[in-house]
Image (cartoon, rainbow, N blue to C red):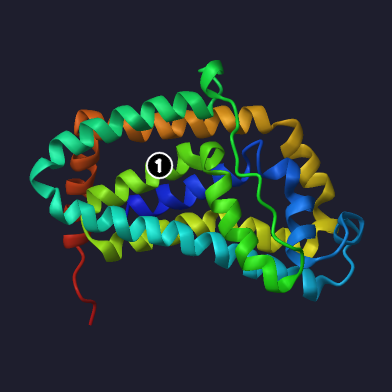
Amino acid sequence: MLLAIPVALLAGLVSFFSPCVLPLLPGYLSYASGLSAAQVTAGSRRGRVLAGTALFVLGFALVFVSGGVLFGSLGTTLMQWRGTINVVGGVLAIVLGLVFAGWVPFASRTVRLNLRPRVGLAAAPLLGIVFALGWTPCIGPALQVVLTLALNEATALRGALLALVYALGLGLPFLIAGVALDRFGGTLAFVKRHHRTLQVIGGVLMMAVGVLLLTGGWDVLMGLLRQWAAAFGTVI
């Protein structure tokens, strides 16, 4: 978990900076708060924007955590095939990393549900659920890496924790933007200009996790971390 948690957090951040999330950020905040995109961008009614964004994040976090619980539970049942699961998960992570980096053009098309709940705070959690389900083909590569790690951890609790950390990695930038989108215009413009580079870096990192799972390097790192943690003693 010492290594899996930072990977899950990074996967969430990578998903946020993907082409299907960051460029549409004002639109997400607008729908979640029930305000116009111009009001959100101008920084008006920050309390309402923050509340709507938090409910939106809660909606997609519920979906991701449910998936983490499912994969973690399956991991308990499938522990006897852990080696095979690591190989399959590693290959899948490498392939999805290639897709995320844009190096598999025919697989880079975005498919999403064409559902849109009524705007406003009451609908914000539902919007988050629709986001989690509808944008899965786009954010799916990064999410799949986290679910593979959840399967590897082999408990529902650990799977839920990894999925929650992923949701935080994706959701915290949403919350920051909800509070001060008007102050981060320059930062967002810089990220948009370099989103291709960020996308490639994210894909390479996902492939690196896949290689570790495929070659057994992940288990070696786990062993080293356990030895490192066991070396600590109680300080009196």
Relative image position of residue 186 (x, y in whole percent)? 83, 45
Q: Which residue appears at 70% of the width and 31% of the height?
A: 194
Q: Vertically, is 42 above or below 213?
A: below
Q: Give the residue pinned by disc 1.
A: 144
Asked whether, in this view, residue 157 is left or right of residue 13, the answer is left
Q: Residue at x 41, y 47 (%)?
A: 7
- Please name the residue shown 37% across and 27% down the image: 94
> Callout 1: few (<14), some (14-19), or many (20+) C-alpha neighbours within 10 Å?
some
Q: Amino acid at mark 1?
A: Gln
Left/right placement of residue 86 relative to residue 97 reads left
Residue at horizontal 56%, vertical 59%? Answer: 129
User: On screen, 29 above or below 86?
Assistant: below
In x, y percent, where is residue 211? 30, 28
Res 83 → quadrant: top left
Specify the farthest residue to the left: 80
How far across and how far down the image is residue 208, in percent?
37, 31
Splitting the image into 4 quarters, where does residue 188 fall? top right
Q: Nearer the viewer, residue 89 or 235?
A: 89
Badge 1 element: helix
* Nearest the eye: 179 or 29: 29
Above or below residue 15? Residue 233 is below
